[in-house]
Amino acid sequence: MKLKLIMDISWALLLARWKQTLVAAAGVTFSIAMFISLLGFMTGLNVLLDGLILNRVPHVRLYKSIRPSQKQPVMQVPGFRKHYHFISSVKAVNASQQIHNSQAILTYLGNDHLVIGATPRITTQVFFNDGNIDLTGIVQGIDPALENKLFNFDEYMISGSAADLSKIPNSIILGKSLADLLLADVGEVIQLTTTQGQVFQLKVAGLFQSGIQEYDKTQSYASVNVVQKLLGKTASYVTDIQIKLTDITQAPAVARKFARIFETDAEDIQTANAQFETGSFIRTLISYAVGITVLIVAGFGIYNILNMMIYEKMDTIAILKATGFSGKDVKTVFLLMALVIGLFGGILGLIVGFGISVMVDQIPFVTPSLPTITTYPVNYDPWFYGIGIIFSLATTLLAGWLPSRKASRVDPVVIIRGK
C-alpha cells in the first residue's frame, strides 16, 4: 500500500513539471538513439572491413617452408664431427614445398570435429604476357566448390563464378585490376609464362574484386589440376592446405597440434593477422567509448533537472516528511522519478536508434573498389540494444541518487518555518 502511494506521488510530481520531465526524457532518448545508431554503424563498418580480409583467410594454414639442411657435408667428415662449425651462405638443396600425403591429411581433417572443412591449394608465381611486357603475378590453384563453401569466393566475383573453373577447361579467374592491366575480359584468352619458362594460354572464366587494389593487381585463380599442369607436377602435388575451424579462438592450439601430427609448418589466423586484429579491437573500443560518453553527458542533464526539481519542491518534501514519510521514502520517490525518466527515454531511444539505423542501411553506397557492397553497413546486434537500455536506467539512477539523497535529509521544520 505504501509503495503504491510512493509511486503515485512520484508520478504526480513528474506530471506537475511535465515540461522538465519531457526535456529529461528527451535527453535520454537522444543519447540512446545516438548510442545505438553510432555503435551499429561503426561496428558494421568494422565487420565489413574485417570481412574483406578475414573471410578470405584460413583459420589454420598448413604448408612446407624451404629450409637448409641441418646436416651439412662438413659435419659428416669424421675428423670434424667434434668441432664447432661456422657456415655462412647456406643454401637449401633439393627442398620442396610439396605437402606429402596431402589426400590422407585432408581425409583426417574431414573427420576432425574441430574442423568445418579443409581445401587444398597450390601457389605459384608466373609472368602474365602483355605484348612485350611481362607482369609479375600469382596463380592460386583451388578446388572451386570447397573454396566457395569455406571462403565465400562467389561474393567477390563481379563476373562469372568459381564453378566456371570446373566447367571450362584450361580457364583462369583474374583480379579486376590485373584484367584491366592486361586489357582482358571474360571469354578472352591470355598468355602466361611459368618460372620454368613454359608458356601456356588460358581462357578468362571470370573476374573477382577483393576491394584491395594491390592484391587484385597480382592475384588470379585456376583449378588445382590446371596449376599442376602449369608446373608439370603430378595429381598429388599440393603446397598448402587451408582449414576453417568451428572455433576460431582455438586456432593457435590447433595449428601447433596439426604441425606436430603432419610434420608440416602451420600458421594460425591470430599470428598471421595480429596487427589487423589489434586495429579492429581499437576501432571497436573507440565505438563503445563514444557511445558511453554520450550517455554520461545525458546523465548530467538529468542530474541538473532533478536537482532543480528538488529545490522547487522543498515545501512538498517538507509536507511529506511532516505527515509521516521517512527520509528513505522521500529518497525512493525521487529515485522512482529518475527510473521512470530513464525507462521511458531509453525505450523511445531504442526505437529512434533502430529507425536511424534502418535509414542509414538504405543509403546507397557505390564505390568501384567494392562492387558487392550496395548500402552503408549497419550492425543490428541485439546486445547493443540491451546495453543501451541498461545504461539508460543505470545513468538515470546514478543521476537521481544525489538529488534524492539531498531530499531525504531535508528538515521539514526548517522549511516550514522559512515559509
Image (cartoon, rainbow, N blue to C red):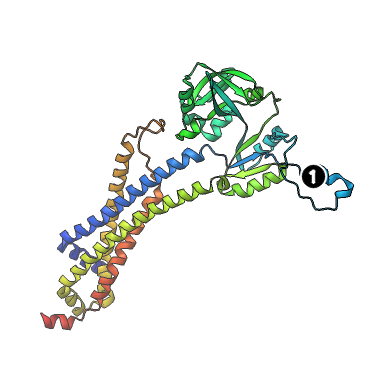
Say if residue 142 shows up in the picture: no
Residue 207 on image: x %, y % = 48, 25
Reading the image, the residue beneath label 1 is: 71
- Front-most of residues 404 and 59: 59
Label 1 secondary element: loop
Q: Is residue 116 left or right of residue 45?
A: right
Residue 244 on image: x %, y % = 58, 40
Give residue 106's quadrant in the image: top right
Give residue 332's quadrant in the image: bottom left
Instruction: Name the quadrant of the C terminus.
Output: bottom left
Say if residue 264 shows up in the picture: yes
Q: Residue at x 67, y 31 (%)?
A: 238
- Front-most of residues 333 and 366: 366
- Front-most of residues 225 and 179: 179
Q: Amino acid at mark 1?
A: Lys
Residue 227 on image: x %, y % = 63, 25
* In the image, farthest residue toward the top: 188
Residue 151 on image: x %, y % = 53, 35
Q: Is residue 383 left or right of residue 225?
A: left
Q: Is residue 81 left or right of residue 403?
A: right
Q: Is residue 95 above or below residue 33?
A: above
Badge 1: few (under 14), some or many (20 or more) residues near its Cα, within 10 Å?
few
Q: Is residue 137 above or below residue 186?
A: below
Q: Is residue 13 above or below residue 389?
A: below
